Amino acid sequence: MLSLDVRTETLRLAAPFRISGYVFETSDVVVVTLSDGRHVGRGEASGVYYTGDDVPAMVAALEAARPAIEAGPGRQELRGLLPPGGARNAVDCALWELEAARAGVPVWQLAGLQPPRPLRTTFTLGAASPAEMAAGARRYAEARSIKIKLTGELDLDIERVRAIRAARPDACLGVDGNQGFAIGQLDALVAAMQEAGVSLIEQPIARGREADLQGYRSPIPIAGDESILSLADVPGAAGRFDVINIKLDKCGGLTEGLMMAEEARRLGLGVMVGNMVGTSMAMAPAFVLGQVCDLVDLDGPTFLTRDRTPGVDYRDGDIWAGPDVWGSAPATVA
């Protein structure tokens, strides 16, 4: 039997963060701790704002499943107890860490992976004026890869990207449409992005309009994010997207994230790991998944006024999540 502790936290952002259709100033998260009386496991989840998977929904799901969770399910069994989303993510990550503590080995070893390496990560610029975003790109002096949030205002978005490219001719640039564009705008968007040397266009169209991309040919890879929530969505990505963006809050944890990466590879799709805004406790499990991904976007703690200690390390454009952050062995009850 396990004991389940559920608590909520409000993370404050250092500055308002704008994307297509939303402005964020805080991020509410759920933190789950599982204990067997000797070892503990932890998981943090932000949920998925555009599906209504917020903190109250996550807490309600966890409380409804409390007896089954405290009975000590395996990670595959958990996939039948809770649907994809933040609640399952928090419990799944806690189970991984608990299992690692019991076995006396790190999570990456449990997952059958090679010893982890630092990963090149993108650093994200929220939407603002072209001049403000160019200044932000210059402030990201160590960033080697920058993600640019767009708003669906085509002409303004093009000016934003051009200003950032002029400020950072050295950086790898990707753009994230966050569902802000219609299919009829894509030719103009793609042409301008190609001219600016952009290497990835993420989720340009709305979730539910994926069929609009069937057969669309772009010289720049197009990634599905909001359109690809869980393992069930991966087969439908073929022929519409070139890359899938796996987020643990969407799919329900590291267990399903690894399964999604394997299925994407089988279908010939590229694999990206991303994040909702969260602390290092949320980045560390995604860092494990990142070891088998082509692209990494794990900059969530950089937006916060305060991160957890110990936290992930950002250096020379890379992220490193050491065993002291999460998934270490052993994690024991004090």
Image (cartoon, rainbow, N blue to C red):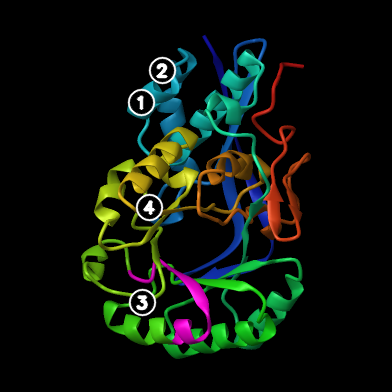
Whether the residues at callouts 4 and 1 have beta carbons within 8 Å, the answer is: no
Query: Which circle, 4 or 3, is nearer the viewer?
Result: 3
Badge 4: residue crowd in 10 Å (few <14, some 14–19, many ≥20): few
Percent across and percent down for residue 54 are: 47, 47
Percent across and percent down for residue 3 are: 56, 16
In this figure, which residue is indicated by the disc labeled 4? Answer: 51
Distance of mark 4 from mark 1, alpha carbons? Answer: 19 Å
Element type where label 2 sits in the image: helix
In this figure, which residue is indicated by the disc labeled 2? Answer: 68
The amino acid at mark 3 is Phe
In this figure, which residue is indicated by the disc labeled 3? Answer: 181
Name the residue located 46 percent from the left edge and 29 percent from the top edge.
62
The amino acid at mark 4 is Thr
Res 81 label = 1
The amino acid at mark 2 is Ala
Distance of mark 2 from mark 1, alpha carbons? Answer: 8 Å
Q: Which residues are magenta?
A: 192-205
Element type where label 3 sits in the image: loop
Name the residue located 64 percent from the left edge and 34 percent from the top edge.
115
Name the residue located 44 percent from the left edge and 84 percent from the top edge.
153
Q: Is 164 covered by the magenta stretch?
A: no
The quarter of the image holding the C terminus is: top right
Q: Is residue 72 left or right of residue 287?
A: left
Whether the residues at callouts 4 and 3 have beta carbons within 8 Å, the answer is: no
Name the residue located 68 percent from the left edge and 51 percent from the top edge.
319
Whether the residues at callouts 2 and 1 have beta carbons within 8 Å, the answer is: yes
Whether the residues at callouts 3 and 2 have beta carbons within 8 Å, the answer is: no
Vertical side of 1 occupied by 221: above or below: below
Query: Which circle, 3 or 2, is nearer the viewer?
Result: 3
Q: Nearer the viewer, residue 91 or 141?
A: 141
